[in-house]
Image: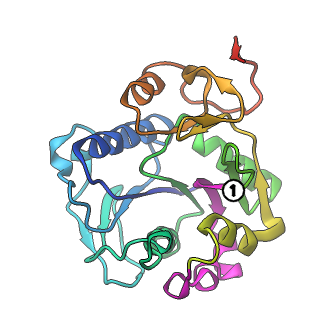
Amino acid sequence: MRVLVFGITHCDSPARLRLLDQWAEALQRIAPDGDHPIIDSQSPVFDLASLPHLSRFQPAIGVPSGTAPVAIGRRSAVIFPDDIGSVSQGGRDGWGRAFCQGLLCAMANGHDYVVHVEGGLLTRLDIPHHCRTMQERGINALGGVTPNKGWLEAGLVFFDVAYLERARVVERYAWDRRTPTLFSQIVLSELIGDELYLRMWRGAKDNIAMLQYFVKDLHWIATEKVIENDAFMQEGRWPARGFGDPVEQVIV
C-alpha cells in the first residue's frame, strides 16, 4: 500500500517555519514509509535547509499558477509561483488550489491513499493503520471533526485515491471558480457526501476542543502556541491507533 501525506503551508514567520519542521518530524514518526510533499504558495519564510527535519526535503519542484500533476520524491516541496490569497479575504481560493495539487500528486504518482495533514496541524494518529482500516472496510473518505463547528476538519482528512478519480473530486471542487459564499470545508463535505466517515478523534484547534483534554491525550492539535506544540511532540503515545482509548483525566 502506497500512502502520500501532504501538507498545505504558508510560513510568514520563523515560528511558523519551526511548526512546519515539527509537522515533518511528526509524520516521520507516524508514517515513515509514506511520501510527504509540502504544498506552498510563495511563503515569505521558507528556508527548509535551516531546520533539521525540513532539511531532508529535496529541492523545490515548481508548478504553474494552476494545478498540474508532477512527479515527486519521498520528501518534496511543491511550490506555486504566486500567492493568490484566500476567498475569505477577498482573494482567490489559494487553499483549494493547494489542496487539489496535493490530491493530484497522489493520483499522478500511483498512490493508493492520500492524507491531508495541514502544515499547521500536528497529529500522532497511526496513518498507515487508518489507511488499512479504510481498505478493509471499503471506506472512501475519512476525517476528523473541527471542535465547536461540527463540520469536517479539512486539515486532517484521508482519501482512497481510486475514489477521488472515480468521483472527479478535483474537477468538481473547481478551485478556480470558487467564491466566498461557502467555507472550503462545507464545499468539500458536500462533494464527498455519504462517502465521508467522521471520527471523533480528540483534537484542539485555535485553543478550542470539544472537551478540555490534556495536550498529551490529544490525537491532533492546530495552534500557534509554541508551548502546547512542544508538549504535544514530547508527551503522549506515538503513534495513536484508536479514537476511544480512555484517558487518565479530563479537565472540566
Residue 28 at least partly seen = yes
Q: Quadrant of residue 140?
A: bottom right
Q: Write the residue at 61% across / 33% down.
A: 219
Q: Is residue 61 above or below residue 75?
A: below
Relative image position of residue 53 (x, y in whole percent): 28, 40
Q: Write the residue at 47% across / 76% down.
A: 93
Q: Which residue is mark 1?
A: 152
Q: Is residue 20 magenta?
A: no
Relative image position of residue 159 (x, y in whole percent): 64, 62
Q: Is residue 206 above or below residue 43?
A: above
Q: Where are the magenta residues, as a range?
A: 153-179
Q: Is residue 66 above or below residue 38?
A: below
Task: Name the image quarter holding the C terminus.
Answer: top right
Amino acid at pointer 1: Leu
Q: Is residue 37 above or below residue 125?
A: below
Q: Is 29 left, or right, of 81 in this rendering?
A: right
Task: Name the image quarter holding the N terminus.
Answer: bottom right
Relative image position of residue 189 (x, y in whole percent): 72, 66
The type of colouring in the image is rainbow
Name the outermost residue toward the bottom: 177
Q: Write the residue at 65% across / 82% down.
A: 168
Q: How many marks?
A: 1
Relative image position of residue 26 (x, y in whole percent): 43, 36
Q: Write the residue at 28% across / 46% down.
A: 17
